[in-house]
Amino acid sequence: AQRVTQPEKLLSVFKGAPVELKCNYSYSGSPELFWYVQYSRQRLQLLLRHISRESIKGFTADLNKGETSFHLKKPFAQEEDSAMYYCALRGSHSGGYQKVTFGTGTKLQVIP
Amino acid sequence: DVKVTQSSRYLVKRTGEKVFLECVQDMDHENMFWYRQDPGLGLRLIYFSYDVKMKEKGDIPEGYSVSREKKERFSLILESASTNQTSMYLCASSAVESNYEQYFGPGTRLTVT
């Protein structure tokens, strides 16, 4: 079974402060991890994935297999970062097909 | 640019009605998904399909069925709508060519009264 845990429902930070959105996962194989974001009145979209190892909009995320974590970080929060963030894991379904499991989401609120 | 469209943005149905939600993607993606999105529960997978006429149950398939007769279209069916199926329904598609990035539709807000 695969599971994604996002312990915080809401994270409020001041503009310019560092941000860390937590994500922990449970999976027996080698997972592929993603962060998706949903801005107000927009559709859900990919922010970044661990295999790309890139920074998007100042956000980075490192896969830590020892701690089974994929936390999303940004050194200085901007007001436009306010959104709903979902961590997701792509693993193998019992039939060998791909299945994606999402966490419960964290709402990031950046206070001006 | 991938486009995933859903047949309705808002839908109001009565308890016991049969409800059809349709999703169409225009990028020849082999994988398609139906999720429901509820506050505090995140996205929960209802069904997914990896090919025409193929379907797999997700985490919460009870009360739902799906149909995929054409590659670009994936329908979600509520056989007999109940109030606990009031939710936001999201469709998504993905393909190996895009490294399995999921492209989402705008969502259908279904209210069952």
Image: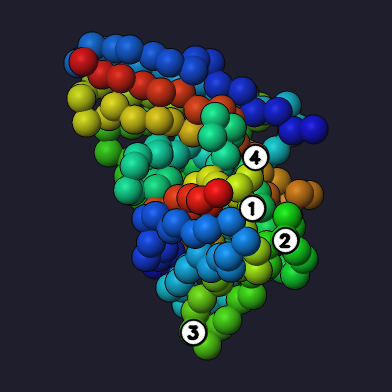
For label 2, the crowd category at 10 Å Cα-Cα, with few meaning under 14, some 14 to 19 and many 20 or more, is few
Q: Nearer the viewer, mark 3 or mark 2?
A: 2
Q: In the rendering, at what x and y percent does residue B7 appear? A: 53, 16
Q: Nearer the viewer, mark 4 or mark 1?
A: 1
Q: Where is mark 1, residue-wise?
A: A78
Instruction: Locate the C terminus of chain B by quadrant.
Output: top left
For label 1, the crowd category at 10 Å Cα-Cα, with few meaning under 14, some 14 to 19 and many 20 or more, is many
Query: What is the distance, in whole Å, between disc 3 and disc 4 at their CAs?
Result: 29 Å
Residue at 54% from the left image edge and 29% from the top image edge: A41
Q: Is residue B29 above or below residue B112?
A: below
Q: Secondary structure at mark 4?
A: strand
Q: Are marks 1 and 2 on the same chain?
A: yes
Identified by mark 1, the residue type is: Gln
Residue B57 visible at all: no
Give the label on residue A67, or none: 3
Quick one: label 3 or label 2, which is nearer the N terminus?
2
Residue B72 visible at all: yes
Query: What is the distance, in whole Å, between disc 4 and disc 1 at their CAs?
Result: 25 Å
Query: What is the distance, in whole Å, between disc 3 and disc 2 at their CAs?
Result: 23 Å
Q: Where is mark 2, residue-wise?
A: A58
Q: Where is mark 4, residue-wise?
A: B103
Q: Secondary structure at mark 1?
A: loop
Of all chains, the one bearing label 3 is A
Identified by mark 2, the residue type is: Gly
Query: What is the distance, in whole Å, between disc 1 and disc 2 at their CAs?
Result: 10 Å
Query: Camera-side residue: A22 or A28?
Result: A22
Query: Camera-side residue: A10 or B79?
Result: A10
Q: Nearer the viewer, mark 4 or mark 2?
A: 2
Q: Are marks 1 and 2 in contact (CB under 8 Å)?
A: yes
Residue at 80% from the left image edge and 33% from the top image edge: B1
Q: Is residue B60 above or below residue B24?
A: below
